[in-house]
């Protein structure tokens, strides 16, 4: 496995913690550029709290459901973001 940012092979697998001794049961991703007052249906769960980290540059990444993220952006985000990503505007 290689780092998504710097292409280093010095990558380790791990989990995200929200306290020193407590593994967070769920982690979520929320896109920026949401329309004002958008509150519900805007989170995509990170799959299995399984993260990777690069020991060279410090970049951390995980996997989410790309289809769900696209649906959230299409329905709830600003048209400028949709245009930048090549998604249809509502």
Image (cartoon, grey):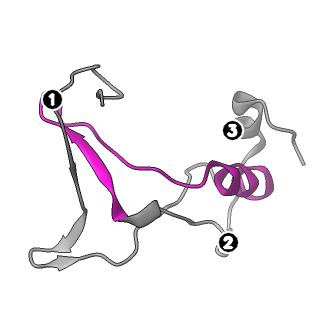
Crowd band around label 3 with a 10 angstrom C-alpha radius: few (<14), some (14–19), many (20+): some
Q: Is residue 48 left or right of 90 when viewed as pictured?
A: left
Question: Could you say which disc has been placed on residue 83 in the image?
Answer: none
Secondary structure category for the residue under label 3: helix
Vertical side of 74 occupied by 9: above or below: above
Q: Is residue 39 magenta?
A: no
Q: How many marks?
A: 3
Question: Could you say which disc has been placed on residue 41 in the image?
Answer: 2
Asked if the residues shown at circle 2 and circle 1 are in contact, with their CB atoms under 8 angstroms apart, the answer is no
Asked if the residues shown at circle 3 and circle 1 are in contact, with their CB atoms under 8 angstroms apart, the answer is no
Residue under label 3, please give it.
Answer: 81
Q: Position of residue 57 (x, y in %)?
A: 17, 29
**For discs 3 and 1, the disc positioned in front in the rendered view:** 1
For marks 2 and 3 on the same chain, the one whose residue lies earlier in the sequence: 2
**For discs 2 and 1, the disc positioned in front in the rendered view:** 1
User: Which quadrant is the N terminus positioned in?
Assistant: top left
Read off the magenta span.
Answer: 49-77
Q: Position of residue 71 (x, y in %)?
A: 75, 55
Extreme residue toward the front, this view? 1
Q: Quadrant of residue 2?
A: top left
For marks 2 and 1 on the same chain, the one whose residue lies earlier in the sequence: 1
Residue at (87% x, 42% y) in the render: 89
Secondary structure category for the residue under label 2: loop
Residue at (31% x, 52% y) in the render: 51
Residue under label 1, please give it.
Answer: 10
Residue at (21% x, 69% y) in the render: 17
Q: CA distance from mark 2 to mark 3?
A: 18 Å
């Amino acid at each position: 496995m290689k780092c998504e940012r710097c292409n280093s092979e010095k990558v380790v697998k791990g989990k995200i913690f929200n306290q020193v001794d407590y593994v967070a049961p769920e982690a979520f991703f929320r896109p920026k550029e949401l329309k004002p007052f958008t509150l519900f249906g805007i989170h995509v769960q990170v799959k299995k709290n399984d993260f990777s980290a690069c020991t060279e540059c410090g970049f951390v990444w995980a996997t989410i459901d790309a289809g769900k993220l696209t649906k959230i952006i299409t329905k709830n985000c600003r048209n400028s973001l949709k245009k930048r990503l090549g998604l249809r505007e509502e």
